[in-house]
Amino acid sequence: MKYFSLNDKSHISNYENAVIRGLAPDKGLYFPQEIRKLPATFFNELQHLSSEEIAFEAIKSFVGNEIPENELKGIISQTLDFDFPVAEVEENVGTLELFHGPTLAFKDVGAKFMAGSLGYFIKKGDLGKITVLVATSGDTGGAVANGFLDVEGIDVVILYPKGKVSEIQEKQLTTLGRNIKALEVNGAFDDCQDMVKKAFLDEEITSKSKLTSANSINVARWLPQMFYYFFAYKQLQKRDQKLVFSVPSGNFGNICAGMLAKKMGLPIDHFIAANNANNSVTEYLDSEIYKSKPSIPTISNAMDVGNPSNFVRVQQLFENSFPHLKESLSSYSFTDEETREAMQRVFEKTGYVMDPHGAVGYLGLKRFQKENPDYYGVFLETAHPVKFLNTVESTIDQKIQIPGSIQQIMGKSKVSKEISSYEDLKNYLLN
Ligand SMILES: *Cc1c(COP(=O)(O)O)cnc(C)c1O
């Protein structure tokens, strides 16, 4: 498959190069040149296909012959070693639980698939060592650390803001060791992000080591997220009802992958981008004016993004037509107070514990269904409530059970190096 840069369509790349580079040389995001419809037989036989078979059929055209079939199947089976159940929460409201993976948030799938792809290209070619450099506000770091652990030829360097990630998140990215290094930055997430961006442009560094990034701008992290929508649809196929997905959105990688699945023929009728106070896209759909904003801290902090990097991909999927986009996408924004109220209400009424991100998704869905009651709706639960333990326990006034895998990690000791400036990062990478 060929990919073009969204900044300059004449800049073409193959899958391998897009994965290794992350961004095109002109800093544009890569986008597939062709989006093929899946055959009707695929949907007719869906009930008889395993998750791995569904994933393989969905992604194979995007990888093409650059990874042999058997290798690709191996990567997929390592990626999908857990379940993606749809749980019924209320009448006409289901939740797709994406938190049963090793780091308890949905980013595990993308991180593992990217690690598998990059690992294959390193093994095959003579690329030398590659350094994955990534800034995290919380969940990306753990997923990337776990996904890339012990992948031959790859070192991972994770920058995270000191004191601004949850205790569980910090343990997940600082206790694995081996090829995973954690840098604790005296600053905010934006400082981490700026340092990473600067390093990518610093020739003193890039002439000495190959750097790549592992956030959802990378096609190998973005594309496999479409699997979720196929897995959910398989569980809902028997219903004869229009279907809407509400996706708690930050950088818009997840929702954009769902829209890609729809373009491939998956019968989804509508999408909802559920936002916290960081609502650039909600405002855009209301006003047709897009304004990026500085990010505002909220209790659903993985969505505290003022300028969503994948939104240009969403627009491209609709050929940059605002009316077409608006037909398929609604967006609503909610305050922390509304989010907490929803968590309380749903817990009291049904016993279901939502994390703050899922709760924003739930609110988006309910708002949409008020005017569109004929839809069956699914909101994505993007993280296990235990990842936001303090917020969840104080909100629903109830202790929640900590899974065994987390208890184990909490007992390990953190290894990180503190840095305060770009110079510190540069010295670290050059040595
Ligand atoms: C990353 C993340 C999101 C946002 O996903 P995007 O693909 O960036 O829109 C939402 N919820 C949780 C828990 C996350 O970790």
Image: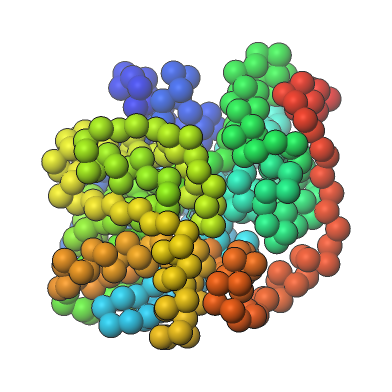
Q: Residue at x 72, y 24 (%)?
A: 422
Q: Is residue 151 above or below residue 350?
A: above
Q: Quadrant of the N terminus?
A: top left
Q: As rendered, which of 196 and 151 lies closer to the eye?
A: 196
Q: Position of residue 334 (x, y in %)?
A: 38, 57
Q: In the picture provided, is 104 more to the left or to the right than 180?
A: left
Q: Residue at x 42, y 86 (%)?
A: 350
Q: Residue at x 62, y 51 (%)?
A: 138
Percent of width and height locating residue 245: 30, 62
Please give left or right for residue 71 compared with residue 228 in the image: right
**Image: 102 above or below 396:** above
Could you tell me residue 365's position as x and y percent? 30, 65
Q: Residue at (77%, 30%) from the top-left corner? A: 420
- Quarter of the image for residue 430 reads top right
Q: Residue furthest front?
A: 337
Residue 126 in view of the camera? no
Q: Position of residue 133 (x, y in %)?
A: 65, 35
Image quadrant holding the C terminus, namely top right
Classify 43 as above or below 199.
below
In this rendering, the count of numbered labels is 0
Q: Name the quadrant containing residue 183.
A: top right
Q: Is residue 20 visible in the rendered structure shown here?
A: yes
Q: Is residue 319 above or below residue 254?
A: above
